[in-house]
Image: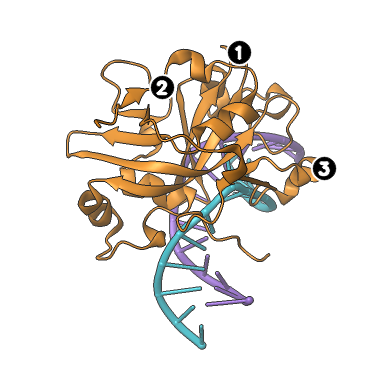
Chain colours: A orange, B cyan, C purple
Amino acid sequence: MLRQKTRLSRSFFTREDVLQVSRELLGKYLVTDFGAGRTAGRIVEVEAYRAPDDKASHAYGNRYTERTKVMYALGGHAYVYLCYGIHHLFNVVTGEQGMAHAVLIRALEPADNTALMLRRRRMNKIEPRLTAGPGVLSQALGISREYTGVDLLAPESPIWIENREEPVAAAEIIASPRIGVGYAEECAAWEWRFHLRGNRWVSKQRVS
DNA sequence: CGAATGATCGGCT
DNA sequence: GCCGATCATTCGA
């Protein structure tokens, strides 16, 4: 039976509950096509960032700067920023316009055109290092800061998210505290990181 | 304008 | 496991 590939709709992203949207992004496919070839990976790990009350969010307290302004866009836009001066981290903005929620995509299971992903990562062999981690998955898919603000629902968008009709059972989703947000005080304990149970492509938990 | 600080990664020990 | 890389962003002077 032919598996259907459908781009997620605007209404998927504009919902208010960013935790629910985060859970539902597991099992969907992040796809890029910049002309050099189409690459895609199955989303296996995400984190929710909820404005304005989440101290781990760049939009905490509705902070509005040149960098964060894209977070206030309509759900379905990309928010890409540079972390530690090296890594480009891909988030998808959720909620209605003016609501700065976002979901960070943290790990993918390689799916389409792994040859191009390997080339972008300067690797020879498919192993978790290819796409397990928010910085490395962006590199594998060719995503960089220049794509922040892109609308994933625009017809000619080089980045989008697909449903390939591979349902994920609620029992397969593990919730845990987000990675690297120790500065966020009481919000650091919130279990807003979601990943697929036992999946080999989930990023390794760093031991302090 | 200067300084501190990350939603990290990978090479080296 | 440790540690250095490397720079946009932010904030305060």
Quick one: label 2, few (<14), some, or many (20+) residues within 10 Å?
A: some
State the residue position of label 1: A98
Residue located at (70% from left, 29% from top): A60
Query: What secondary structure is marked by label 1?
Result: loop
* Residue A160 sits in quarter: top left
Looking at the rendered structure, the secondary structure element under dot 3 is: helix
Query: Could you tell me which residue is drawn at 37 percent across and 39 percent down?
Result: A144
Mark 3 or 1 closer to N-term? 1
The residue most toward the front is A1
- Residue type at mark 3: give it: Glu
Cβ–Cβ under 8 Å for marks 2 and 1? no
Residue reaching furthest left?
Answer: A36
Q: Which mark is residue A65?
A: none
Label 3 chain ID: A
Q: Which residue is mark 2?
A: A8
**Residue named by callout 3:** A186
Chain for numbered disc 2: A
Quadrant containing the C terminus of chain A in the rendered view: bottom right
Q: State the quadrant of the N terminus of chain A.
A: top left
Q: Nearer the viewer, residue A38 or A164?
A: A164
Q: Residue furthest right?
A: A186
Spatial separation of the CA atoms under disc 3 and disc 2:
33 Å
Give whichever of discs 3 and 2 has the lower sequence position: 2
